[in-house]
Amino acid sequence: MRLVIQRVTRASVSIAGELHSSIATGLMVLVGVEQGDTSADMEWLAAKTVALRIFPDENGVMNRSVIDAGGEILAVSQFTLTASTRKGNRPSYIRAAGHDVAVPLYEAYCAEVSRLIGAEVRRGVFGADMQVELVNDGPVTIIIDSKLKE
């Protein structure tokens, strides 16, 4: 699994021109699920997401987690994170997990993050054509791949 995590002052997802979900200060998380990903990958990434110390403390040092900062989380599935660009100019998505694997792992990730932060994770809609808006704060953007955890 691969995540792109952005610290935001606000973020939202719209579908067909209608606001679907939004957050104020917190994390915008794009979630890509690859073939071979497991619940162990999901659990590791969920724990990492909520523990990342990327919010400023009273001295302006990135030393607080989203929980410490009282932030919210918006998680959006994004299969394009699995793209391979090794050959040619058209990305290949052959590594992307099928719906039978990707949907349960995305849903489980959202549920586990919700449990860890003690609040609802806002979501996009898996497979929908979504418009995502955000204001990246910092900017702070972190990429985490569960295949690179060791």
Image: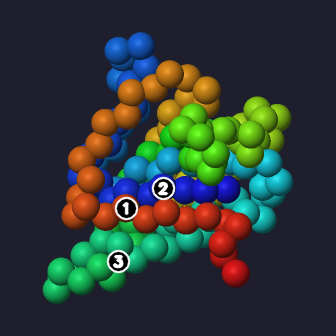
Give coordinates of residue 71: x percent, y percent.
35, 59
Mark 2, residues whose alpha carbon is within 10 Å: few (<14), some, or many (≥20)?
some
- Name the residue at the top extreme: 16
Question: Could you tell me the amino acid type at mark 3?
Answer: Arg
Secondary structure at numbered mark 1: strand
Which residue is found at the position 30% from the left and 71% from the top? 55
* Dots 3, 2 in contact, CB < 8 A: no
Which residue is found at the position 78% from the left and 55% from the top? 37
Question: Could you tell me the amino acid type at mark 2?
Answer: Val
* Dots 1, 2 in contact, CB < 8 A: yes
- In the rendering, which numbered label is found on residue 16? none
Q: Is residue 125 visible?
A: yes
Q: Is residue 106 left or right of residue 50?
A: right
Considering only vertical position in the picture, is 43 above or below 75?
A: below
- In the rendering, which numbered label is found on residue 141? 1
Give coordinates of residue 10: x percent, y percent.
27, 46
- In the rendering, which numbered label is found on residue 64? 3
Mark 1, residues whose alpha carbon is within 10 Å: few (<14), some, or many (≥20)?
some
Q: Which residue is mark 2?
A: 4
